[in-house]
Image (tube, grey):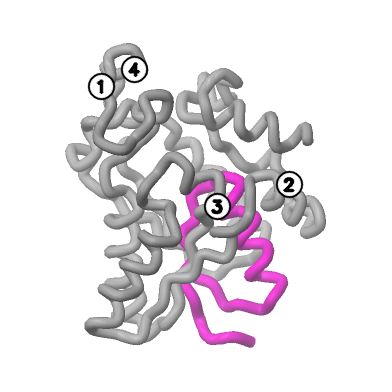
C-alpha cells in the first residue's frame, strides 16, 4: 500500500477517472473537494458518491468564500457570456467559465493540508484539453506551483493527465469501469440535470461519442 496522497476531487470526469486509476494502483487517498458557491454545486454530491463507491476513508470538503470568485459566471448568477469581457490571454469563448486563480487556491489549501498530515503527493486531474483555455491547468502552472512548494517542503503536485485529451481520459475510464452517469461537468445544471448546451457539456458529449 502506498503512502497517503491527496486527490482534488470535483465530481467531474477527470478527477473521477483519476481517483479510479489511483485506487486501482493501491494509493491510500484523501479526497479533497471545495464548496465555493458554484452554480454546479451538485458536483459535490457526485464526488460523495464516488468516494463511497471506491471506499475512500476520508473526504474533506472545504468551504471557501464565494466573493473570491464573484467575477466568474460560474458563481455570479447575474453574469453570462454576453455580458462578459475577455480577460488577458483568455479566449472570449471561454471567459465565462474561467474562475480567477481557482486551481492556485485549491492547491494552496491542499498543500497546507498535506504538510499538516505529512503527505508528500497531491494529485490533480487537469488534462491536455483544459490547458488550451485555462492558464492554471497548464504544465507550466503545475511546474511553477511545484517550485513554490519546494521552498518549504518535499510535497509534489502530480498531474497524470496533462498529456491526455478528454477522449483519452474517458477511454481510460471505460477500461477502469467508471460510471460516467455518476459524474457531472455541466456549468449550469437544471434540476440536477446537465443542461447539454454549455461548453463543458459539449466537450463531454463529443468525447463520450467518439
- The residue that label 3 is drawn on is 127
Image location of residue 174, percent across then percent down: 79, 51
Residue 65 higher or lower than 123, as above or below? above
Q: Quadrant of the C terminus?
A: top right
Q: Position of residue 80 (x, y in %)?
A: 34, 17
On the rendered image, what quadrant is the N terminus found in?
A: bottom right
Residue 16 drawn at (x, y percent): 61, 53
In the depicted structure, whether residue 148 falls above or below residue 49: below
Residue 44 visible, this angle: no
In the visual, does 179 lie left or right of 33?
Answer: right
Q: CA distance from mark 2 to mark 1?
A: 37 Å
Secondary structure, mark 3, is: loop
Measured in 3D between alpha carbons, the distance from the residue under mark 3 to the one under mark 1, in whole angstroms, is 26 Å
User: Which residue shows up at 70% across the image and 37% down it?
Assistant: 207
Label 1 element class: loop
Position above or below: 86 against 21: above
- Residue 191 horizontal side relative to residue 72, left or right: right
Read off the magenta span: 1-30
Mark 4 — residue?
80
| Magenta highlight on residue 24 | yes
Which residue was labeled with disc 2? Answer: 179
Front position in the image: 92 or 99: 92
Q: CA distance from mark 4 to mark 3?
A: 25 Å
Amino acid at each position: 500500500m502506498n503512502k497517503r496522497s491527496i486527490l482534488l476531487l470535483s465530481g467531474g470526469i477527470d478527477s473521477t477517472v483519476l481517483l479510479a486509476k489511483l485506487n486501482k494502483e493501491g494509493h491510500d487517498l484523501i479526497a479533497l473537494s471545495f464548496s465555493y458557491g458554484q452554480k454546479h454545486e451538485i458536483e459535490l454530491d457526485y464526488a460523495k458518491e464516488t468516494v463511497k463507491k471506491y471506499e475512500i476513508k476520508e473526504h474533506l470538503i472545504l468551504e471557501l468564500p464565494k466573493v473570491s470568485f464573484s467575477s466568474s459566471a460560474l458563481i455570479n448568477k447575474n453574469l453570462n457570456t454576453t455580458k462578459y469581457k475577455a480577460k488577458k490571454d483568455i479566449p472570449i469563448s471561454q471567459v465565462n467559465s474561467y474562475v480567477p486563480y481557482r486551481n492556485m487556491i485549491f492547491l494552496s489549501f491542499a498543500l497546507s493540508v498535506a504538510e499538516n498530515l505529512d503527505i508528500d503527493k497531491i494529485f490533480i486531474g487537469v488534462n491536455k484539453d483544459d490547458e488550451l483555455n485555462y492558464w492554471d491547468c497548464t504544465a507550466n502552472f503545475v511546474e511553477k506551483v511545484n517550485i513554490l512548494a519546494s521552498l518549504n517542503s518535499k510535497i509534489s503536485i502530480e498531474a497524470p493527465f496533462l498529456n491526455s485529451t478528454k477522449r483519452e481520459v474517458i477511454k481510460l475510464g471505460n477500461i477502469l469501469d467508471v460510471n460516467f452517469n455518476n459524474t457531472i461537468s455541466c456549468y449550469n445544471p437544471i434540476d440536477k440535470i446537465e443542461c447539454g448546451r454549455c461548453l463543458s457539456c459539449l466537450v463531454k458529449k463529443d468525447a463520450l461519442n467518439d
